[in-house]
């Protein structure tokens, strides 16, 4: 019988699957550890969704060391050591972890400035493209990104008038 | 020594330009850019670094503004060459030390230059004499726009231009002004100034930029924040801060001179004497003396030198400049002797 991945003592009776970065991670837990991580209380007393987050937070702490950027293989702990990213995809990979850092460094989380010329489509095209992205973000339940996109669209529409 | 041709040219930034040239030396804009489809230089193997460099250089050659530029491959430069370029503010200390397969592209009059494979794939820089941030930004931005049509930049709607270090993300822009602040330093008010800069989202660095010491009371004041402000806002904010610093330096100079007139005149004129008659000069001492001369000119003390000549002496008497000019390496002792000879020949 498999032992619990956290305490490594009791037999694992609960299996939890999480998808991070399109990679499936499986965690085998004993009942005691699962309860400590808030699995039962959150999972059974609420209908899931955002109220699951305390549990997910506990889980991500467990998994954190294993998150690696798909673009360059950089891990979060390597980033924390050097303070430098490995490739442009790292920003997407470690997005949730770096928001606090960016806010501390710059006091802001959203770019305001020039864009590469190749991306300079007409305002209409840009609004259309951003609206597509917004739909996708909502579908994927990436609400923070959706909020940023919504604000950009609003700003562009205002500029058009 | 591939760089001797540069000795005949005058670096553009030493020119005496605009008001307050005794306080403001030069203005610089730097944009950090990366290519979307490759890891950043530190995480690319040598072969990949070379591929990235070749791709970037082939595109740079298509930019009309850079038609007459010179391109140097970092691995083909001697340590003296690299130091020479650092002394001319064309490459960073980091690129000079780095083992990356990099390059430096230097445009006409050394106004525009591009470092390839430093910390980011591209560092596009503009350097002009005097307080001239807006014009410098415009030149750099035009070249950046042209390159963005030919290379796929790493860019996100949310975070802007994506850079190796999160301190550069967003605009990827560092705007800086090299200032000479002798009165603020000599009256022990520099730490107060540095602290208040931090509160304004600005930072002061040494003579050769990031990670270098202050020399001769020169400081590079630059923006710290790169995300959430537009390029124009950053430039505008820095320019306002710089103007405040200039005002402060002038006020301090005036009261300092009123208080210690003879003391200051004695030090300024002695500095001229030392520079004219010394047989050996370290760069450190030269810069200390030059600091007094520049302040003396600012205070209206009669001296047979101009700011432009002083800037020229500062540039040419740096260690690698001495070595490139004489075409041989010099030990420390020889350097001091050659420096004193050179300075004397200008005064």
Image (cartoon, coloured by chain):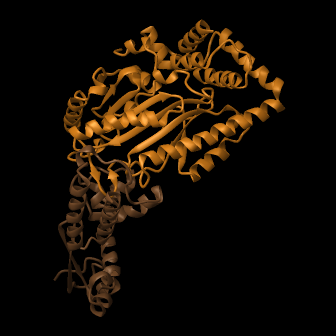
The residue sitting at the top extreme is: B345
Taking depth in this image into account, of B62 and B267 the one nearest to the observer is B62
x and y, in percent, of residue B241 in the image: 58, 44
Count the numbered circles shown: 0
Residue B15 sits above or below residue B340 on the image? below
For the point 46% across and 14% down, the residue is B323
Which tint is chain A?
A: brown
The residue sitting at the bottom extreme is: A45
Taking depth in this image into account, of B287 and A32 the one nearest to the observer is B287
Residue A43: quarter of image: bottom left
The quarter in which the N terminus of chain A is drawn is: bottom left
The residue sitting at the front extreme is: A161
Taking depth in this image into account, of B231 and B273 the one nearest to the observer is B231
Residue B174 sits above or below residue A2 on the image? above
x and y, in percent, of residue A79 in the image: 35, 55
Q: Can residue B75 be spotted in the picture?
A: no
Residue B272: quarter of image: top right
x and y, in percent, of residue B223 in the image: 50, 45
Residue B255 sits above or below residue B326 on the image? below
x and y, in percent, of residue A149 in the image: 30, 64
Chain ID, orange in image:
B
Q: Is B60 on the left-hand or right-hand side of B251?
A: left
Q: Is A51 on the left-hand or right-hand side of A137?
A: right
The quarter in which the C terminus of chain A is drawn is: bottom left
Q: Can residue B56 be spotted in the picture?
A: yes
For the point 34% across and 31% down, the residue is B114
Q: Is B96 on the left-hand or right-hand side of B276?
A: left
Taking depth in this image into account, of B187 and B332 the one nearest to the observer is B187
Residue B147: quarter of image: top left
For the point 43% across and 21% down, the residue is B84
């Amino acid at each position: 019988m498999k032992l619990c991945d956290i305490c490594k003592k009791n037999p694992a009776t609960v299996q939890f699957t999480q998808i991070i970065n399109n990679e499936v991670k499986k965690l085998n837990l004993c009942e005691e550890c699962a309860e400590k991580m808030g699995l039962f209380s959150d999972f059974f007393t609420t209908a899931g969704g955002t109220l699951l987050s305390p549990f997910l937070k506990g889980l991500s702490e467990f998994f954190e060391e294993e998150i690696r950027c798909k673009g360059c293989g950089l891990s979060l702990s390597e980033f924390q050591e050097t303070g430098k990213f490995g490739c442009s995809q790292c920003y997407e990979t470690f997005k949730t972890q770096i928001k606090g850092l960016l806010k501390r460094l710059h006091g802001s989380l959203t770019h305001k400035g020039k864009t590469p010329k190749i991306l300079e489509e007409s305002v209409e095209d840009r609004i259309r493209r951003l609206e597509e992205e917004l739909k996708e973000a909502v579908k994927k339940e990436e609400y923070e990104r959706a909020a940023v996109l919504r604000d950009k669209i609003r700003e562009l529409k205002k500029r058009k008038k | 020594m591939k760089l001797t041709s540069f000795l005949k040219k005058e670096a553009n930034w030493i020119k005496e330009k605009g008001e307050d040239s005794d306080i403001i030396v030069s203005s610089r804009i730097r944009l950090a850019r990366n290519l979307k489809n490759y890891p950043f230089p530190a995480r690319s193997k040598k072969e990949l670094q070379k591929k990235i460099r070749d791709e970037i250089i082939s595109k740079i050659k298509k930019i009309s503004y850079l038609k007459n530029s010179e391109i140097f491959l970092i691995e083909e430069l001697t340590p003296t060459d690299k130091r020479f370029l650092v002394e001319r503010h064309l490459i960073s200390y980091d690129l000079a030390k780095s083992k990356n397969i990099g390059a430096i592209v230097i445009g006409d009059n050394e106004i525009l230059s591009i470092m390839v494979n430093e910390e980011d794939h591209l560092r596009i820089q503009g350097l002009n004499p005097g307080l001239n941030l807006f014009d410098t930004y415009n030149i750099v931005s035009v070249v950046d726009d042209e390159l963005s049509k030919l290379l796929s930049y790493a860019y996100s709607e949310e975070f802007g231009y994506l850079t190796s270090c999160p301190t550069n993300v967003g605009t990827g822009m560092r705007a800086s002004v090299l200032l000479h602040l002798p009165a603020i330093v000599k009256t022990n008010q520099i730490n107060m100034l540095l602290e208040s800069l931090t509160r304004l989202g600005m930072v002061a660095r040494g003579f050769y930029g990031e990670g270098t010491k202050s020399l001769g009371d020169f400081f590079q004041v630059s923006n710290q924040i790169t995300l959430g402000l537009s390029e124009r806002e950053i430039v505008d904010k820095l320019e306002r801060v710089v103007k405040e610093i200039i005002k402060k330096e002038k006020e301090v100079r005036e009261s300092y001179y009123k208080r210690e007139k003879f003391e200051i005149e004695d030090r300024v004129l002695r500095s001229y004497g030392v520079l004219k008659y010394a047989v050996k000069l370290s760069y450190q001492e030269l810069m200390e003396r030059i600091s007094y001369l520049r302040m003396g000119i600012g205070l209206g003390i009669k001296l047979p030198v101009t700011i432009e000549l002083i800037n020229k002496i500062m540039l040419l008497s740096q260690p690698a400049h001495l070595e490139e000019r004489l075409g041989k390496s010099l030990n420390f002792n020889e350097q001091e002797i050659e420096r004193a000879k050179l300075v004397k020949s200008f005064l």
